[in-house]
């Protein structure tokens, strides 16, 4: 994984010192809250309902054991002994005291981490495929290109005050495990007919109150021009994006109103203008970055056989373990979705266990996923049983990856000042209703996502089943949506009709799954049956 150079470290250390002075002035009353607000937001510090919330950047979701242990220590030292992993591969702490922030940021800096550009109208954390570097279906590891974009976008003078926040995802396979086309810019690393590495660009995707799927903007950009094409897109957005209305300020609105064809013309013209201006990194720099992501020292000649005699282990193996590009190895996903738990939460003790597993079994590396889980990317198959046993002991072995209880949920009204309704209790009740693992497996792949407001931090638009919490005259009300997907078969979910109360939405989820079980054809997932049948049979079951 990437290691800071002297510039990276100096940049982060300087920001810590700067913010320490700003916090001291705020606590002394020399800065008002209005004056302090943009300063704290530049350091990922939000004012939530009950306390400050800090969002820490985890670039493309990759962590070392040392970093994971520091995240555990921060949870113990500065929070209430847990952290919340998010859909953008970050981690959030919900109970931070302002006076602790400088020391907290210094602790992060000591392990090459920070909270810069995790808030505000800037380019946010660059995200990627959690299986990057381990999956057999990728044309290259996408993380070096994500790292190149991270370096380009950090403190970029022209893009520090964009019309709105900006999110970029980078993948390198046809299977989209990162909801790439629901980002402001989605990049797929590809090979052309000549076998050359390059990038396919999408732009104008996003969720929120106006969800849109990003159209294709350019089919192939040579890898050596990856940054300058991103720069061209950003310049067009920065020039034409609306600043008079924050609800219409995202690039998706610009692409929609301008039209994809004209937007492409503007970007191509800007891209042509940038030729020869040395925007892109030298080839040697890209090679230097790629060097940090070389394959670990895999053992050869390992057996692919796994002892499946323990039935509980076999269930976990079938659901949470995926094929690896290297014979004898596997990719294992740690579920942060125990029945009755809070999706994405991990205690400091659980983080320490994961750090131990990374260090002992996975070449000192893990990944945070878009579904709020953790991946151990490089496990010897002969070690899977030992890993699973340790996960069982730590309550981290739920065998529910991509099943109905593997719920994505935002913090909702329990924490967030923007939310209209609670997400966490709904997620817990649904998980308990479908707690039986045999029932979950019978339903098969079913991605359920919950947001507590229209900002869609829980990605409800991309759920096979989505739930949106809204305020109806001071009462929490939950809309049910069907048919979304954030994968390569990307689609936006549609609202079924009138909403439900908290218990009613749990019943509604069960009713639509009953329709699916009764009507599905062989091999169909829930979303496939919905697409074949349409909305009507589900509405009939819900509303009669």
Image (cartoon, grey):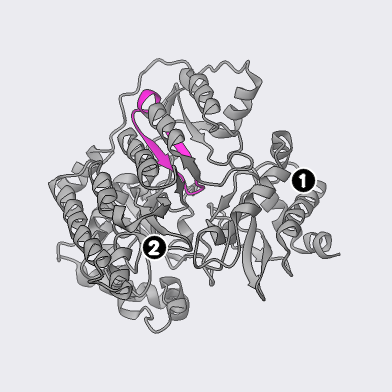
| Towards the viewer: 511 or 291 | 511
- The residues bearing labels 2 and 1 have C-alpha atoms spaced at a distance of 47 Å
Does the rendering let one see residue 133? yes
The residue identified by callout 2 is 46
Asked if the stretch drawn in magenta spans residue 375, the answer is: yes
The residue identified by callout 1 is 521
Residue 511 falls left or right of residue 272: right
Q: Quadrant of residue 530?
A: bottom right
Q: Position of residue 177 (x, y in %)?
A: 49, 47
Does 345 sit above or below residue 381?
Answer: below
Instruction: Find the residue positioned furthest to the bottom.
Output: 244
Q: Position of residue 21 (x, y in %)?
A: 19, 61
Mark with earlier residue (2, 1) = 2
Secondary structure category for the residue under label 2: strand
Instruction: Find the residue positioned furthest to the right.
Output: 544
Residue 368 falls left or right of residue 489: left
| Towards the viewer: 308 or 339 | 339
Does the rendering let one see residue 491? no
Does 451 sit above or below residue 90?
Answer: below
Instruction: Identify the residue shown where x is 23% and y is 48%.
Output: 106
Which stretch appears magenta? 359-376
Q: How many residues crowd around disc 1 within 10 Å: few (fewer than 14), some, or many (20 or more)?
A: few
């Amino acid at each position: 994984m990437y290691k800071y150079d002297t510039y990276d470290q100096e940049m982060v250390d300087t920001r810590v010192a700067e913010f320490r002075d700003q916090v001291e002035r705020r606590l002394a009353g020399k800065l008002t809250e209005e004056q302090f607000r943009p300063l704290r937001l530049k350091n990922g510090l939000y004012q939530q309902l009950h306390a400050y919330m800090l969002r820490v950047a985890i670039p493309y979701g990759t962590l070392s054991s040392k970093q994971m242990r520091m995240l555990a220590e921060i949870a113990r030292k500065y929070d209430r002994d847990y952290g919340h992993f998010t859909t953008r591969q970050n981690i959030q702490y919900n109970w931070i005291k302002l006076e602790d922030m400088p020391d907290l940021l210094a602790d992060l800096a000591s392990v090459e981490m920070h909270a810069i550009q995790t808030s505000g109208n800037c380019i946010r954390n660059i995200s990627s495929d959690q299986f990057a570097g381990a999956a057999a279906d990728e044309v290259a590891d996408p993380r070096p290109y994500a790292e190149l974009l991270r370096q380009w976008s950090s403190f970029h003078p022209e893009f520090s005050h964009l019309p709105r926040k900006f999110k970029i995802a980078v993948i390198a396979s046809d299977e989209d495990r990162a909801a790439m086309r629901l980002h402001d810019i989605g990049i797929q690393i590809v090979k052309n007919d000549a076998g050359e590495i390059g990038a396919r660009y999408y732009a104008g995707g996003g969720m929120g109150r106006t969800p849109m799927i990003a159209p294709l903007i350019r089919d192939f950009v040579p890898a050596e021009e990856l940054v300058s094409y991103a720069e061209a897109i950003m310049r067009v957005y920065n020039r034409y994006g609306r600043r008079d209305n924050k609800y219409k300020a995202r690039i998706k609105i610009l692409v929609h109103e301008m039209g994809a064809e004209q937007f492409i013309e503007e970007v191509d013209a800007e891209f042509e203008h940038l030729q020869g201006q040395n925007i892109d990194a030298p080839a040697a720099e890209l090679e230097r970055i790629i060097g940090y992501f070389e394959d670990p020292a895999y053992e050869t000649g390992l057996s692919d056989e796994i002892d499946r005699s323990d039935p509980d282990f076999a269930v976990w193996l079938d659901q949470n373990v995926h094929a690896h590009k290297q014979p004898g190895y596997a990719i294992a996903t740690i579920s942060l979705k125990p029945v009755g738990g809070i999706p994405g939460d991990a205690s400091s003790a659980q983080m320490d266990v994961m750090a131990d597993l990374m260090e002992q079994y996975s070449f000192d590396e893990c990944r945070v996923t878009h579904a709020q889980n953790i991946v151990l990317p490089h496990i010897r198959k002969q070690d899977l049983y030992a890993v699973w046993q340790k996960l069982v002991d730590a309550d981290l072995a739920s065998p529910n990856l991509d099943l109905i209880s593997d719920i994505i949920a935002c913090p909702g009204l329990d924490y967030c000042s923007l939310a209209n309704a609670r997400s966490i209790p709904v997620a817990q009740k649904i998980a308990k209703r479908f707690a039986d693992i045999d029932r979950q497996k019978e339903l098969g792949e079913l991605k359920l996502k919950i947001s507590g407001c229209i900002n869609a931090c829980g990605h409800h638009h991309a759920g096979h089943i989505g739930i949106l919490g809204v305020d109806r005259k001071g009462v929490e009300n939950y809309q049910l949506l069907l048919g979304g997907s954030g994968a390569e078969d990307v689609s936006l979910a549609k609202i079924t009709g009138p909403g439900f109360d908290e218990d009613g939405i749990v019943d509604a989820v069960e009713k639509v799954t009953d329709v699916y079980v009764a009507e599905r054809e062989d091999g169909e997932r829930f979303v496939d049956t919905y697409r074949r049948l349409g909305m009507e049979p589900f509405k009939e079951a819900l509303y009669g």
